[in-house]
Image (tube, grey):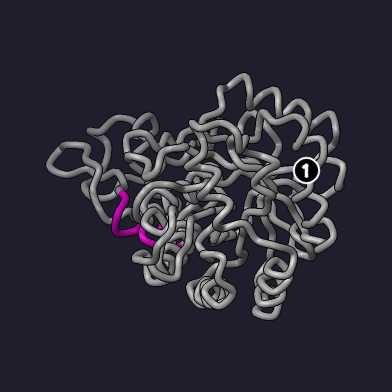
Amino acid sequence: MDFHIGNKTLNRNSSPYLVAEIGLNHNANLEIGKRTIEKAKKSGAHAVKFQTYRTEEFIDSKNPEVKFLFDIFKQYELNESFHREFQKTALDLGLDFFSTPLCESAVDLLSSLQVPIYKIASGDIVNLHLLNKVIQTGKPIIVSTGAALPEEVIRAISKFQKEAVEVCLLHCVSMYPTPLDKVNLKSIPYYLDTTDYIVGFSDHSDGTLASSVAIGLGAVVIEKHFTLDRSLDGPDHTISMDPITFRKLADDTHQSFLMRGVYGKNTHTEETSGWFYGRRSLYKQNQRILSLRPALHTKDKTVLDSWELDKVGDPSLLPEGPIRLTPINK
């Protein structure tokens, strides 16, 4: 199934599509947000993604156990004006702009902005209210699967299939940062084998290695947290990539895509052109039958190649040198 982002079409053979997850890293500051978008573009991103919400609509303000979480999100809550400014900056730079809605009113705001796609956070793959609201928009959906049980992923996929939703499924591990022995990239070919969706990777590990390997395994969309400066105050800056490392991510994933090639055993003409020196023909040498280089059979079809031992005949009757196919007497 193809996946559409505005006028772009992604399929399983598309080159890497890189999403700079700005999230809360705008620090509720218009200039920081705009500069972060500009740096994302220069660093090789194809899209920037934010988070859209009214804090009271997705965190219980009366629960003391999550007051710290409520306070963090409230501090970085974006109004409509900020959304429009960030969207304009992104679109003017040729970047796709979209966001993760964390409540139903956020879907309404993003719908008024005519975003091309929606992102469902890992924690909301089990949120039926929000899924129903996003599905009703008719737009394609990127869905992260971090911390979800296998049966919960299957349940969500069944709903998407029933509703005929266009989906990009992201493998994700909800650990920040994710230790390398927990990245579990084999989930990518698993999703490719068990669904018809394009598959991506929301990468929370350090560095670019995991994303590069993910591309080799068939991922198309790569999402990474992105910041203007990792030393800025805020909850996500230290787990995010700065412009220099994101540029390396863009370069490394592009090279990984070039290395991926095609499914199956693909033999290049540059390889077969070296057969004369690298393969062998059959020779008689000192009364012994040997496989020797060069492979004369590649230039003289009457010479036997090293697999054709059954065609040698009686060795005592053969002359020294390359062994040729004995003509059949009629």
The magenta stretch spans residue 33:
no
As drawn, 153 above or below 50: above
Instruction: Name the element at disc 1.
Output: helix
Q: Is residue 293 found left or right of 123 in the rendered image?
A: left
Residue furthest to the bottom in view is 92
Give the percent coordinates (x, y) of residue 235.
43, 53
Residue at image x 49%, y 36%?
A: 329
Residue furthest to the left in view is 286
- The residue where tag 1 is placed is 104
Give the percent coordinates (x, y) of residue 314.
29, 30
As drawn, 191 above or below 303: above
Query: Quarter-wise, where is residue 114 in the image?
Result: bottom right
Give the percent coordinates (x, y) of residue 164.
84, 36
Residue furthest to the top in view is 151
Q: Nearer the viewer, residue 253 or 320?
A: 253
As drawn, 92 above or below 110: below
Q: Which residues are magenta?
A: 270-279
Identify the main secondary structure in magenta. Answer: helix
Q: Nearer the viewer, residue 279 or 27?
A: 27
